[in-house]
Amino acid sequence: MSIIRSLTLLLIALVSVLSLPAAAQEDDPGRQLLIDLAEAPASNVEEAINAIVSSGDPRARGWLEAYGNNRLSRVKNTGQVVVVLNNRGRDWEIANPLTGENMGDMSRRELDRVAINNAIRGQLEGILAMLDLSATDPDVREASAQDMMGKVNASLVEPLEARLELEESARVRNRIEEALAIYRVGEGNLEGVDVLAGSLHPRARAALNDAVRGDDPALATKAQQALGTIEQKLKLNRAAETLYFGLSLGSVLVLAAIGLAITFGVMGVINMAHGELIMLGAYTTWGMQQLLPGQPGLALILSIPAGFLVAATAGIIIERSVIQFLKGRPLETLLATFGISLILQQLVRTVISPQNRTVVTPEWMSGSLVINDALSLTLNRLYVLAFALIVFAALMMIMRRTRLGLEVRAVTQNRNMARSMGIRATRVDIMTFALGSGVAGLAGVALSQLTNVGPNLGQNYIIDSFMVVVFGGVGNLWGTLIAGLSLGTINQLLEPWAGAVLAKIIVLVFIILFIQKRPRGLFPQKGRAAEG
Amino acid sequence: MWLTRPFQERSTQLFLGILSIAMIVVVVLHLATPEGSALHVSSYTVTLLGKYLCYALLAVAVDLVWGYLGILSLGHGAFFALGGYAMGMYLMRQIGDRGTYGDPILPDFMVFLNWQELPWYWLGFDMAWFAFIMVLLAPGLLALVFGFLAFRSRVTGVYLSIITQALTFALMLAFFRNEMGFGGNNGLTDFRDLLGFNLRTDATRLGLFIATGVALAIGYVICRAIVASKLGRVSIACRDAEARARFLGYRVDRVQLFVFVVSAMLAGVAGALYVPQVGIINPSEFSPLFSIEIVVWVALGGRATLYGAVIGAILVNYAKTVFTGVMPDAWLFALGGLFVLVTVFLPKGIAGLLASRRKGKDDDSGTDDPDTATTREATA
């Protein structure tokens, strides 16, 4: 096999040598470099490549990539080196590697591929990575150093060490050191193990695992210890990740339930259509994005007030048309609002579509915040978590510090007394219900970034929301916050060994049992408020 | 003695009379008229009516707890479904080696999941008597445990409603899991015969229809008997003034528990009769929507009347059959509208309308009316 390959190479080299050198019209040094590469016999290819690399030419990366992909060819009669853009069919599309100019199609018979053997191709990856290592953007440098982990070979050690001397960014230095350490551990070096013990990258672990299985006992024990340290750190990171997902799920629950905590907890109105108010908020986001195509971020921000207004308006309509007639009959209110929820669901199905709608995530909300190799936090969940806390704080402010909040609390505690003090109780009812509904709309806007927006969106959250409010203690906003976050976290903690559905069942059963034990929730109301 | 008392009441006599006449008419029309005749009741209709009667029995069970005990259960679908599953498991075992995979012991879905042997909770379901006991026992036990915990800690009102809903939701999620061994998503289906009768013949269908009617009559009489007994009086007292009943020395929690368990068992029987007629039982019967629908049947018919529940269940389900056939999209609008209209404009339901018309003639509005009693309590 290798004989055939050498023969081919020789043949190609011969052909290259025989072909006439093109006239030197330009003084571009790249031209000669490429010709040298094309004409180099197998033993000198490395030298030619190194010449290209050390030239510092910014186009070097493109040339070498083309070379590695078999896309570098010579025009048979002129000897010019070209890059093949498209090698399908009989005519190949080619371009000038020096200017990047497209030279149109040329019959493949007139072209002669610059040959590359597998040994060189294997090295080329490292060489290209080295080229990236000298890029100006530290992110590119870091990515390329990370790419190199586990791929370092003897020929790369020296250039890498040289690079390390020059490197200023600590992140990139760490990566290069890790890449070198992986190579050294492979060579039986003990100090490399210490470097790897501080890394969470899977390739570092792979290298250590290899060392443990290797036949050097001293190295094996040391590597084993290092793996132990890494495992510890990974556990910590995994715990942090679970906590993050738990808090994220909890923040969703809090958002969904906090509006209910106002209407149910403070007003005592059972609003089974609460989930559908959330759904309206989500559909408002979708509608906004339809109105402002191409600007999902702006649409999302505008959806926050819009979602609030839409849901609050819907809430006022529900309150005026149905709930006010059912005052003091909670079970009937429950049934009537359930009817409203069915109507709203079907309305969305009929008017918009029974299918889910896609809400675009704006660019600044997608992606994730990378903490280290083992832990990265998705940005959209982080935003929703922050949003939930802001909404909670704002509600707290409204209930504690504003005139409306004072009136709401007065009406809740003693309606008749509040009315005789001149508070218009009916108006307070409307405002409170509008506030609770509006917050449901806000929850919908946030949820549109995490889940599918469809007619069933509300249904999926209504039982959970009631559970959160009841678990936290009716009429207590702090209780709702703590209940939501802790239920979310418990759910996530259970998930790894119970699975998603079973975890949910366990949480539900837990709440059912908890309510038997403490019927008034985690934080029961005390004093006068409890009597109302 | 207490069981015979209902037969002396006019409303019970009337109800049983109308029910038996209606059943006889259906049976006669089905058997005596030729197919294609305008008066003929097809076998399909007989099964459909049988299904309505199951729902009626379920509604009576809900009315017993809601109307006479003041507990709005949003989880009665769970008891119905448990009874249904008990029956379904028996029917599954009856298939024997006639299934697709021909395994003499294991139902098809277990073979499909590569299960080697029957889970322990499936044992005994090949025997009819055992399965029929489980139809009562499974929902009864769940109600006993759940009710014991809830009533002991005095969870009532809206809280109880919400946790009953959470209960049926949790059960739905659980039964959706394949690992539970109840057929997961698809549930139990493809039944062949019941007590040796082929379920696909018209005669068996007619028999099931009659059995359901009889079960409804018995269930109705049992509920009437409970309501008319001293226990029933105490339960109405608990509904209207729980604290007062407690202070008078009645063990409120025991009364609640007893009535709740009886109601759950009746719901289980309804489920067990429902499954062979419909031919399938799957986790959707556990869905909170179904449970809350039952409540609206009762609300439409008029709570605390029992016969109102029967009227409501049959009317709403007839409307559902018509709507889903003619314009399926409109059904949820109609159902939702029904919820709102009934609660706002018709708080006493159809039975309330009937009663108010009768009121002119003889004044026997009585103490059974939950709403006047609640108002009295609130103003006291």
Image (cartoon, helix red, strand yellow):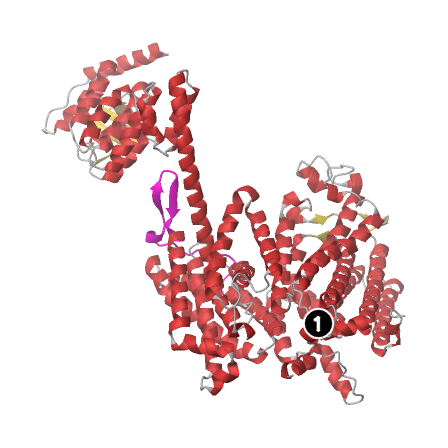
Name the outermost residue toward the top.
A3
Report whether B347 appears left or right of A104: right
Name the outermost residue toward the bottom.
B360
What residue sits 45% from the left and 73% below the top? A434
Q: Nearer the viewer, residue B21 or A325?
A: A325
Mark 1, residue position: B246
Query: Does residue A23 lie above or below B107 as drawn?
Result: above
Q: Is residue A78 visible?
A: no
Q: Is residue A415 visible?
A: yes
Q: Nearer the viewer, residue A487 or A141?
A: A487
Q: How far from the left and from the top, in percent, is residue A436?
A: 46, 70
Tell me the quadrant of the picture where the N terminus of chain A can be found: top left
Report whether B50 appears left or right of A313: right
Q: How far from the left and from the top, in percent, is residue A424?
A: 46, 84
Specify start and end residues of the magenta stretch as a single range.
A352-380
Report whether A520 appears left or right of A387: right
Q: Amino acid at mark 1?
A: Arg
On the image, which quarter does residue B245 sit in? bottom right
Query: Does residue B84 lie above or below B58 as drawn?
Result: above
What residue sits 62% from the left and 61% below the top? B163
What residue sits 44% from the left and 38% below the top? A235
Q: How far from the left and from the top, in percent, is residue A83?
A: 24, 30
Tell me the quadrant of the picture where the C terminus of chain A can be found: bottom right
Query: Does residue A187 lie above or below A333 as drawn?
Result: above
Q: Nearer the viewer, residue B238 or B8?
A: B238
Query: Does residue B195 lie above or below B14 as drawn?
Result: above
Magenta run includes residue B306? no
CA neighbours of label 1 inside 10 A, class few (<14), some (14 to 19), many (20+):
some
SS type, badge 1: helix
